[in-house]
Image (cartoon, rainbow, N blue to C red):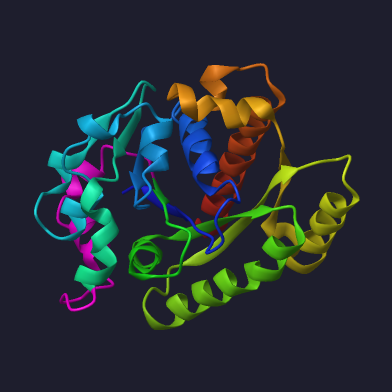
Amino acid sequence: MPRIVALANQKGGVGKTTTAINLATVIAAEHRVLLIDLDPQGNASTGLGLDRSARGAGSYALLLGDRPLAEVIRPTRVANLSLIPSDGDLAGAEVELVDAEARDRRLVDALAAAPDHLRQFDYVFLDCPPSLGLLTLNALVAAQEVLVPLQCEFFALEGVSQITQTVERVRRALNPDLTLSGIILTMHDRRNNLSEAVAADARAFFKDKVFETVIPRNIRISEAPSHGLPVTLYDFRSPGAQAYIRLAAEFLRRQRSRARRKQPA
């Protein structure tokens, strides 16, 4: 079965969706990847070139049980990368799920109901909304690990403890397999002393949980979504694209290291 990875941070504007798109794109060069857009804003779907008018049923229909997994998966321009888009009704899902049965397990149950289709993928990435509501909770219950993009600014560092505490609470109460596997430093500006200070503080506190690769501030990263492309396809040689390529390589190295540790002696 695939490795399920949630990208979560309750703070918006930290590069979460951008990281989900580009990490999934680079990994799809060697693996079969599914990206599930759980954010009502639908930016991951837009960033992969899927126009709102062409989305049809997506993550809302999957969560509410209207459609099975096979019917909501869409191809993308990227080879080996599939997408379950955010549809227009997802904004109301938080309210509708409040009274739903097993409201925190809707995603994990939907995925478990389609094992044959799920086995087509090596990795499933979950792009969460910038909140700690029921959509994010469903992602954390379904995932085996969480990646937390951390913007190199003071308020982002101040709030990252909230998502780490939430991950620990979900692990204890709902999903014992869940781990915080990494902190990804984003929007880093080497000219800015604060960026360097935030990065240093994050490494001092989270130790090796922080990825060595740092994602810089880069105009190409900002431009790429307007063209419906990951930055690695929009401008392969840009510093932003090269950073995401290094990040994907580091992510895969960590995955191999984790797998070796789990092998019996």
Does 160 appear above or below 126? below
Looking at this view, name the residue that lies furthest to the bottom: 173
Left or right position of 252 against 90? right
> 206 or 92: which is nearer to us?
92
**Residue 66 location, x and y as percent?**
9, 54
| Number of residue marks | 0
Does 95 appear above or below 231? below
**Quarter of the image holding residue 265?**
bottom right
Left or right position of 209 against 100? right
Q: Residue at x 37, y 21 (%)?
A: 79
Q: Can the viewer see residue 156 in this picture?
A: yes
Left or right position of 177 against 255? left
Q: Residue at x 20, y 76 (%)?
A: 102
> 171 or 15: which is nearer to us?
15
**Residue 151 location, x and y as percent?**
68, 52
Q: Residue at x 71, y 64 (%)?
A: 155
Q: Can the viewer see residue 230 in this picture?
A: no
Q: Residue at x 36, y 44 (%)?
A: 42
Q: Is residue 101 a member of the stretch shown in magenta?
A: yes
Looking at the rendering, the stretch of residues picked out in magenta corresponds to: 98-124
> 192 or 34: which is nearer to us?
192
**Quarter of the image holding residue 49?**
top left
Does 174 appear above or below 10? below
**Residue 39 location, x and y as percent?**
38, 52
**Residue 98 location, x and y as percent?**
24, 76
Does 189 appear above or below 184? above
Left or right position of 168 against 215? left
Q: Is residue 197 a member of the stretch shown in magenta?
A: no
